[in-house]
Image (spheres, grey):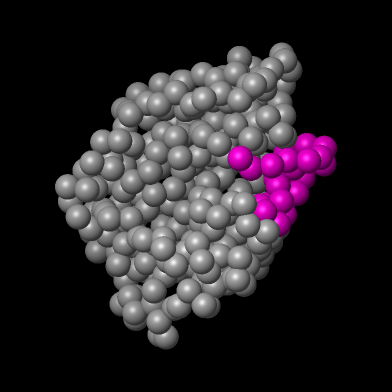
Amino acid sequence: MARQKASDMHPDLRRIYRFVPNPPIRFGPLLALMQAGSRLTLRPPILGGLGYRLIQLGSGAAIHLFTPAGERVRPALLWIHGGGMVSGSAAQDYARCMSLARDLDIVVASTRYRLAPGNPYPAPLDDCYAAWQEITTHADALGVDVSRVVVGGQSAGGGLAAALAQRIHDAGGTQPAGQWLFCPMLDDRTAADRSLDEGRHFLWNNSSNLIGWTAYLGTAPGAAETPPYAAPARRSDLRGLPPAWIGTGDADLFYAENRQYADRLRAAGVPCVLDAVPGGPHAFESIAFWTPVARAYYERALVWLRAALGVSPGPAGYR
């Protein structure tokens, strides 16, 4: 595989991503320090017109709940942060979640989940499922319309959201109104493909991917079988899953697995929009959110989310 260069990226992003490193997760002490920081419960600086509540779920999991002012039932987004299964925290997405709650007039529940390798599969997914159960079981008290709840996330969080949709489908009962997946981490077989190590994938490369998947699975990725829901792209029957929006860039390590999953969802009869941005690297809508290409991409994502939630069109921003 040819080595990826900054010049391969979209012109809006080249200068920014030239200096964006991969996270230092291969260094044990630094990863331990990052994980210690992720366990801190930081109260967000709440935007005007929003209420905030922290709901503890046990085992270290929690929901950061952002609710617009005014007593009424609203649609909701259950959001799951990224970090390669081994890092990250809900705090990194406070700005996104508060903007969504304020601008779309919805309830946003941002999930804090346990991290691998100390808490491998199924612990992170169990925490996300507990968050889903909390939101749907106590919907009346939380002001949530259970018929209009979308699950979403970015990177590892997008993969967990896809796995969560599969698990909820199999459990029966109330189902998500959609899946809102940004550059989702779906397939451990990507990490097992050593040919991808030669490519310089900005922000998240395949060496980091190998560390993340190994930590999450508790074994080497790419085995003949994985446990149910551990790697969403491994599921053979995708029929009946909620409609999906999958956003990615073609300079992202996950581009191929994202495109293949979208194709398989559509083949199974699941409505799916794949928004693939030429020259887009991993998580560019967060790293370079002010650039024209990122803003246009995120606005398209919001159009889909509004439709999935039954929210009237209107202006919305991010940060």
| Vertical comparison of 125 with 279: above or below | above
Residue lying furthest left? 29
Please tell me whether residue 98 belongs to the stretch shown in magenta. no
Q: Residue furthest bottom?
A: 2
Camera sees residue 146: no
Locate residue 172 relative to residue 34 in the image: left or right.
right
The residue lying at 44 percent from left, 78 percent from top is 4
Rendered residue at 55%/36% (across/down): 95
Give the residue drawn at x 51%, y 66%. Answer: 15
**For this rendering, which residue is in front, 23 or 186?**
23
Q: In the figure, 125 relative to 188: above or below?
A: above
**In magenta stretch: residue 308:** yes
Majority secondary structure in the magenta region: helix
Residue 87 lies, in percent from the top left, at 33, 46
On-image quarter of the N terminus:
bottom left
Name which quarter of the figure residue 76 lies in: top right
- Write down the region rendered in magenta: 295-319
In the rendered picture of this protein, how many numbered marks are placed on residues? 0
Pick whichever, 299 or 261, lies toward us: 299
| Front position in the image: 291 or 276 | 291
The x, y position of residue 25, in whole percent, is 27, 54
- The residue drawn where x is 49% and y is 26% is 44
Q: Can you give x and y, in whole percent of width and height, for residue 238 in the image?
A: 57, 59
User: Quadrant where the C terminus lies?
Assistant: top right
Q: Picture coordinates of residue 274 (x, y %)? A: 65, 63
- Please indicate, yes or no, whether residue 79 appears anywhere in the rendered image: yes
Looking at the picture, does residue 205 appear above or below residue 42?
below
